[in-house]
Image (cartoon, helix red, strand yellow):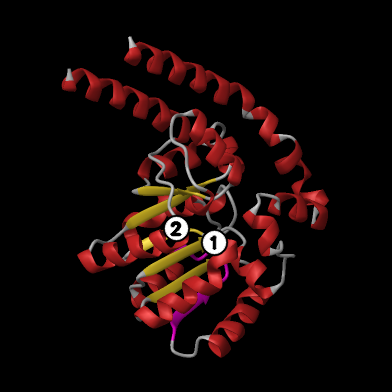
Amino acid sequence: MAAIESKRANELSNVRREYFGTDVTPRSFQQWLDNIAAILASGQRGWLSGHHNLHSLYLLNRNDDVVRFYARCNDCYVDGTPVRFILKCFGKPTLAAMRFSLMDHFFDLLQHAERKRWSVFYLGSQESVVNCGRALIKRRFPDLRIQLQNGYSTDQATIVARINALQPDILLVGMGMPLQERWLIEHLQELDIGFATQAGATLDYYTGAQAKPPRWMSDIGLAWLYRLASDPARLWRRYLLEPWALLRPTLHHWQRYRHTARRARE
């Protein structure tokens, strides 16, 4: 009986994994930090952490680099509020605290890294944003070991060499999807880093180059509305069209999940 139940549980987990492209582990920001600390303390290198929101799920169904990225991920946290509800439909309910965005916690991450003496490398954003970010971070976190590199350089060998010279504990790649996922997949094997993850436009929000949603809007899942109102020409397709394109694959996998769950109860 135990073997049968284990088999059914694995089948349900496989349906979720096929939909998300990886195993999703909902966790709070503090739990994410604790996980980083455990990974670094163990001496592991090249750990890849991802996150999911509706945009990443949309690209997962359309972009091979994104598929490869999530297949390679060692773990994946919940970034977007709608992903919590999708997980619930797949038999994995979560608390609101088990979802966070790096956009809201970048200051906290840098503060924690300074206290823990972690080294950080940020790759992404335009040179003007990087220069502004470098000055802000130096002023607020004078003891933090961090290097920043714009994401528009074509000299990838030099970028890899710069990263490896620092041997950072944490690598943040903020080029936007799917460019950051492609970059990580193409170069991860060359990198001497402890922990790597996607950063999106985190530095742009931190410096004010892009309008950052108020924290309360992010907490209740309305950050997308603020961002859409701030930059409709760039984001209307992402927030108004892409979710509809997810209906078909979501319903398909949900029906498979329900069918598998029903068989497990018989």
State the mark number for residue 167: none
User: Residue, x 35% and y 79% (percent of image)?
Assistant: 116
Q: Is residue 24 left or right of residue 128?
A: left
User: Residue, x 81% and y 58% (percent of image)?
Assistant: 230
Specify whether residue 19 is in view.
yes
Q: Foreground residue, 10 or 186? A: 10
Give the extent of the magenta segment.
144-156
Mark 1 or 2, closer to the camera: 1
State the mark number for residue 197: 2
User: Residue, x 42% and y 30% (percent of image)?
Assistant: 16
Q: Amino acid at mark 1?
A: Leu
Whole-percent x, y for residue 168 in the image: 36, 72
Whole-percent x, y for residue 241 in the image: 74, 34
Q: Foreground residue, 91 or 243? A: 91
Q: Foreground residue, 123 or 245? A: 245
Badge 1 vs badge 2, beta-carbon distance below 8 Å: yes
The quadrant of the image that shows the C terminus is top left
Whole-percent x, y for residue 242 in the image: 68, 35
The quadrant of the image that shows the N terminus is top left
Between marks 1 and 2, how big is the CA–CA gap? 10 Å
Outermost residue to the top: 266
Does residue 182 sit above or below 42 in this rendering?
Answer: above
Q: Is residue 71 left or right of residue 98?
A: left
Residue labelled with disc 1: 102
Q: Is residue 47 left or right of residue 136?
A: left
Where, by quadrant of the figure, is residue 236 drawn?
top right
Q: Amino acid at mark 2?
A: Thr
Whole-percent x, y for residue 145 in the image: 42, 83
